Image (spheres, grey):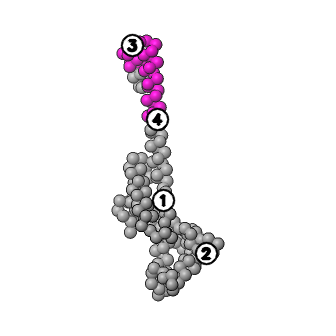
Amino acid sequence: NWPIELRVDEDICWLRGFIQWWTDRGYDFPVRPEKHDFNRHAYEYATTEITANKQTTHFLWFNENEVVVGMTVKAYLAVSRNMASDGALELMNTWEGFIERFNAQAPLSVTGAWQTSKLWVQAEAQAVILNSTLVTLGISFGCVLLGVLVFTRSLHLAIIVMLNVFLI
C-alpha cells in the first residue's frame, strides 16, 4: 500500500499478479533463493501472463541471461492533470522524498528506483515560464522607468508612462 501523502488512486504492479501466480502453485512468497530461481520464474511469468491488458514483459526488463534488471510500477494519482504548478511541485517533492527513503532502506539489489510524471514536467515548465515572464516584465518596466526618467528628468512622468505601458 502507498502512503496517503503520495495520493495514489490506483496502480499497476506486475508483482501482485506474480505473487498470486506463485502462491497458487503452492509456494511461499517471497521466493526463497535457496529453493527456487526467482529470475527463471519471473521470466516464465512475464512471458506467459498478462498484466493490465499488456504482456507482463512490458513492465519488466531482462538481460540476455533472463535476469530481472528493472521493472516499472505505474501509479495513477488522485489529482487533476490541470493541478496548479505549486501544488504539483509540492507533490513531486513528496514523491522524491519517498523514493529517496525507499532507496536508502532497500537492499543493494533493489536500489536505484526513480520516479517521473508528466505532471511534474508540466508543473516545472509552468513555474519556469511564470518566473521568466515576471523577470522579463520587471526588466521591461525598469527600462521604461529608467529611460523616461533619464530623458525627462521627471519621476512623476516616468511613473505615469510606466503605468501606461503596464496597462497596455
- In the picture of the structure, the residue carrying the numbered disc 2 is 66
- Structural distance between the alpha carbons of marks 3 and 2: 78 Å
Magenta stretch in the rendered image = 133-161
Q: Farthest right residue?
A: 64
**Total numbered labels:** 4
Residue at 35% from the left image edge and 62% from the top image edge: 4
- In the picture of the structure, the residue carrying the numbered disc 4 is 133
- Structural distance between the alpha carbons of marks 4 and 1: 29 Å
- In the picture of the structure, the residue carrying the numbered disc 3 is 154
Q: Tell me which label, 4 or 2, sits earlier in the chain.
A: 2
In the rendered image, the vertical position of residue 118 relative to residue 25, given as above or below = above
Q: Position of residue 97 (x, y in %)?
A: 40, 58
Left or right position of 161 against 14 = left
Residue type (three-letter) at the residue carrying disc 1: Gln
Which mark's residue is nearer the viewer, 4 or 2?
A: 2
Q: Tell me which label, 4 or 1, sits earlier in the chain.
A: 1
Tag shown at residue 115: 1
Tag shown at residue 61: none
Left or right position of 64 against 75 = right
Asked if residue 108 lies in the magenta stretch, the reply is no
| Observer-nearest of 129 and 30 | 30
Q: Position of residue 52 (x, y in %)?
A: 51, 69
- Specify whether residue 20 is in view: no
Residue at 46% from the left image edge and 44% from the top image edge: 126
Residue type (three-letter) at the residue carrying disc 4: Thr
Asked if residue 146 lies in the magenta stretch, the reply is yes
Q: Main secondary structure of the magenta part?
A: helix
Residue type (three-letter) at the residue carrying disc 3: Ser
- Specify whether residue 70 is in view: yes
